[in-house]
Every structure is written in C-alpha cells, then in structure tokens.
Image (cartoon, rainbow, N blue to C red):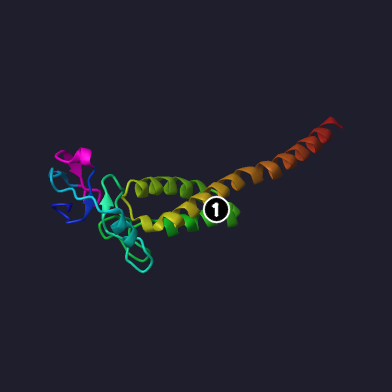
Amino acid sequence: MNCPQCDGKLRVPDELLGCSVQCPTCGITFTAPAGAHDRPSPETIQSDDAPGNEPSQTREYGDPPELPHFGQLRADLPPHRGTLILVLGILSIVIPCCGLLGPIAWVMANHDLKEIRALRMDPQGRGTTEGGRVCGIIGTTLNLVIPLCCGLPSFLLWALFSFRAVAH
C-alpha cells in the first residue's frame, strides 16, 4: 500500500490492517485499509533481488526511515559537526596543552551521536563524529595519565631532596 502523505510504498502486516499505523518515512499516522494488502509471490521477491535489478522500494511497517546515500544531504535536518569534533579530538592528542579539548570533543560527540540515532541530525557525519569521540577519549586519557606518570615521580624526587636539605 502507499502512504497517503508521502506516497511511499510500504507493507503492513495482516494483523495491522484496519488499525492505525505510522509511516516510517514521513511519520504520519493513518488507518491501513482492510483490503489493501497484496502479498507478493516468492517468485516476485526473488526476481526483485536478482543481480541487475534495482532493489524494491517497498518497505516493511516498522522499518527505520531510509537514510540518505553517500553524497546526499538531508536538508530537513541540522548539519552534523563531525569535522569539528574530529579536529578537537585530534588536537587533544597531538598538542599536550590542549587537554581541555578532549573532554569537549567527547561530550559534543556523545550529544551529536544521540541526535543522529534519533534522526534529528544529518546522519552523514556519523563516522567522523565517532572518530572524533574516540580521539577525544584518547586525548582525555593521555592528558590525565601523562602528567600523573611524569609529574608524580618528579614531585617525589623534589620532596626527597628538599627533605634531605632541611634535615642537614
């Protein structure tokens, strides 16, 4: 059957015919007509999946909305910040004095990935955002561990020599 708003093709299970259903593409809720369900034969399904044929545009009820293909932009969603997050994460690893950038990249990436999963942000930047998140985690860890590993022994040596100087 077709969605009354976006005219997208979708399959509705028999048990939902005559009930309210929601189009996975546009989100409109409508009542599925009781006699509109025609199940394709297995031969039709196999021929649709044969090499050289384009994939069928029919979707099952409950399928997530179709994400854009590489190179397509979703004009209806806010743009992703994957590149910015990745740059912040990399800077937090490469430049030791930029240790604060790691947690910023980590928090921004967590927020953006949540929005991408909820389909409220352009999903094209998911990989870049995840990469920036990982870099932010690594940068945060390095900027916490390196000062502890280098600073603690230096402090202990300073304290030891200072204590010896005072004792003599």
Residue 124 magenta-drawn? no
Instruction: Tell which of 140 and 96 is nearer to you.
Output: 140
What residue is rendered at 81% in x and 38% in y?
Answer: 161
List x then y, in percent, for residue 117: 36, 47
What residue is rendered at 30% in x and 47% in y?
Answer: 63
Q: Amino acid at mark 1?
A: Ser
Q: Quick one: which residue is furthest to the top in this view?
A: 167
| 87 relative to 66 in the view: left or right | right
Secondary structure beneath dot 1 equals helix
What residue is rendered at 80% in x and 33% in y?
Answer: 163
- Label count reads 1
Instruction: Tell which of 44 and 114 is nearer to you.
Output: 44
List x then y, in percent, for residue 25: 24, 52
Q: Quadrant of the C terminus?
A: top right
What residue is rendered at 22% in x and 45% in y?
Answer: 12
Residue 17 magenta-drawn? yes
7 in relation to 100, above or below: below
Residue 52: quadrant of the picture = bottom left
The part of the chain drawn in magenta is 14-27
The residue that disc 1 covers is 92
List x then y, in percent, for residue 147: 65, 44
List x then y, in percent, for residue 139: 57, 50
Residue 18: quadrant of the picture = top left
Instruction: Tell which of 146 and 74 is nearer to you.
Output: 74
